[in-house]
Image (cartoon, rainbow, N blue to C red):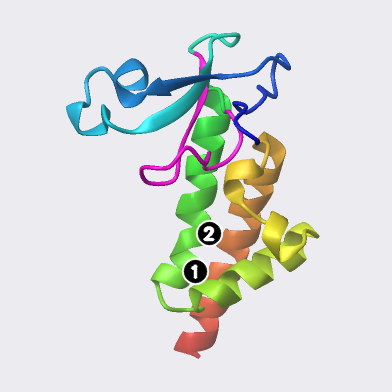
């Protein structure tokens, strides 16, 4: 990023670096966190950062995309949290299914349709692996 804020994928403008106080005014525990925000979308588009860094966790997301990314993580993460796959194996599998290089396979960078695909693929994989372990 070279010191520049991420570009908003909705309007094409640079985002603004803000704190959690602006994004989550009701969550004092997040006030110290860094976010990037753009108000071009109704309800705003934003993304959090890794830990205490300025490195964004993905792309800026409006309410629809935030909901889709959350659903994708819930479905996908159950593959490794249930110990049906090791975490690294799960990500390798997902990268292959999504036809993405491993380094480019991050739910935080996916759009709504890609997130929906992750949900479907992950649910099918979870059912398949669960059936294998009970057979």
In magenta segment, residue 45: yes
The residue under label 2 is 76
Horizontal and vertical percent position of residue 124: 61, 64
Horizontal and vertical percent position of residue 96: 75, 67
Q: Horizontal placement of 128 versus 104: left or right?
A: left
The residue under label 1 is 79
Task: Please state which of residues 123 and 50 is positioned toward the viewer in this rendering.
Answer: 50
Q: Label for residue 124?
A: none
Question: Looking at the rendering, which quadrant does residue 103 occupy?
Answer: bottom right
Q: Residue furthest bottom?
A: 135
Horizontal and vertical percent position of residue 135: 50, 91
Per the rendered image, the range of residues in magenta is 44-60
**Badge 1: residue crowd in 10 Å (few <14, some 14–19, many ≥20):** many
Q: Horizontal placement of 4 versus 127: left or right?
A: right
Question: Is the residue under label 1 in contact with that under label 2 (CB below 8 Å)?
Answer: yes
Kindly state the secondary structure of the residue where label 2 is placed: helix
Q: How far apart are labels 2 and 1 at the CA level? A: 6 Å
- Name the quadrant of the N terminus: top right
Could you tell me which residue is drawn at 53 percent across and 39 percent down?
56
Q: Is residue 38 placed above or below 4 in the rendered structure?
A: above
State whether the magenta stretch is mostly helix, strand or loop. loop
Whether residue 127 is visible: no
Horizontal and vertical percent position of residue 27: 22, 26
In magenta segment, residue 70: no
Question: Looking at the rendering, which quadrant does residue 109 occupy?
Answer: top right
**Badge 2: residue crowd in 10 Å (few <14, some 14–19, many ≥20):** many
């Amino acid at each position: 990023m070279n010191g520049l804020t991420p570009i908003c994928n909705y309007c094409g403008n640079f985002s603004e670096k803000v704190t959690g106080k602006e994004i989550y005014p009701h969550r004092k525990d997040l006030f110290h966190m860094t976010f990037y925000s753009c108000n071009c979308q109704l309800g705003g588009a934003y993304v959090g950062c890794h830990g205490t860094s300025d490195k964004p966790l993905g792309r800026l997301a409006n309410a629809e995309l935030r909901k889709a990314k959350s659903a994708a993580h819930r479905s996908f993460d159950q593959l490794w949290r249930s110990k049906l796959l090791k975490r690294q194996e799960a990500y390798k599998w997902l990268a292959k299914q999504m036809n993405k290089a491993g380094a480019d396979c991050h739910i935080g960078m996916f759009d709504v349709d890609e997130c929906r695909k992750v949900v479907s693929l992950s649910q099918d994989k979870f059912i398949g692996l669960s059936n294998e372990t009970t057979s």
